[in-house]
Amino acid sequence: MSELLKINVNDHVERKGQLTYLSWAWAWAEVLKIDSAARYTVHEYDNLPVIYLKDGTAMVKVSVEIKGDIKTCLLPVMDNRNKAIANPDAFAINTAIMRCMTKCIALYGLGLYIYAGEDLPEGEREGLHAELDAKLAACTSVDELTALFKSLPEVLRREVTDKFAARKRELA
């Protein structure tokens, strides 16, 4: 599934708190583009889509099959701070299932760099940073610098904040 590894997902991420998520609907659509017969399975425990742990928290398990290859992930039912929820409701369980499916898709490559803390797929990172450094150097005012920063995808902004702060000090 190397074609999934090469897709830049930056325009399809969502932010909740300090966390970055890939839209599950978009991710699934990308999977269907390469395998219209792809499927995902939500594993059940005693006819429930979740397994409850002794402390009242819960886990979900999802498998994704693409082109005959099956990958499986587990994920706790969490809030938007990545903290496990005790006695989760149906909405939290459903959210965890879709997050788990998206995490499983990442094992095939789509958005994997988000989980690795990177901002770009293979091969694009160095070129983008060189281009960004040139644009930073070309900024002649704080207003230009601010406009450039705002034009970047949010996942990239977090990585280059220090560079922008240093350039802002130079321009001030």
Image (cartoon, grey):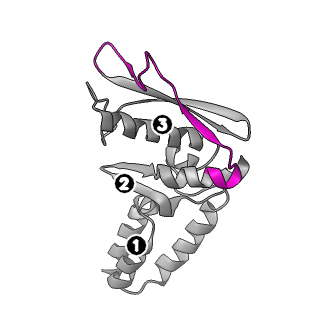
Q: Is residue 26 visible?
A: yes
Instruction: Decide whether residue 70 is among the magenta residues.
Output: no
- Nearer to the camera, 106 or 128: 106
Instruction: Decide whether residue 48 is among the magenta residues.
Output: yes
137, above or below 66, in the image: below
Distance Cα–Cα, label 3 vs label 2: 17 Å
- Nearer to the camera, 95 or 5: 95
- For mark 3, give the secondary structure: helix
Q: Amino acid at mark 1?
A: Phe
Residue 166: give x, y in percent of width and height. Answer: 38, 69
| Label 2 packing within 10 angstroms: few (<14), some (14-19), many (20+) | few
| Label 1 packing within 10 angstroms: few (<14), some (14-19), many (20+) | some
Instruction: Please state if 103 lies on the left or on the right of 59 as rendered.
Output: right
- Which residue was labeled with disc 2? 15
- Nearer to the camera, 161 or 27: 27
Which residue is at the far bottom? 140
Name which quarter of the figure residue 167 lies in. bottom left
The mark that comes first in sequence, 3 or 2, is: 2
The mark that comes first in sequence, 1 or 2, is: 2
Q: Amino acid at mark 2?
A: Arg
- Tell me which segment is drawn in magenta: 31-56
The residue depicted at 45 percent of the width and 41 percent of the height is 98
The residue depicted at 36 percent of the width and 31 percent of the height is 77
Instruction: Please state if 38 lies on the left or on the right of 142 as rendered.
Output: right
19, above or below 43, in the image: below
- Which residue was labeled with disc 3? 100
The residue depicted at 49 percent of the width and 52 percent of the height is 25
Residue 118: give x, y in percent of width and height. Answer: 52, 51
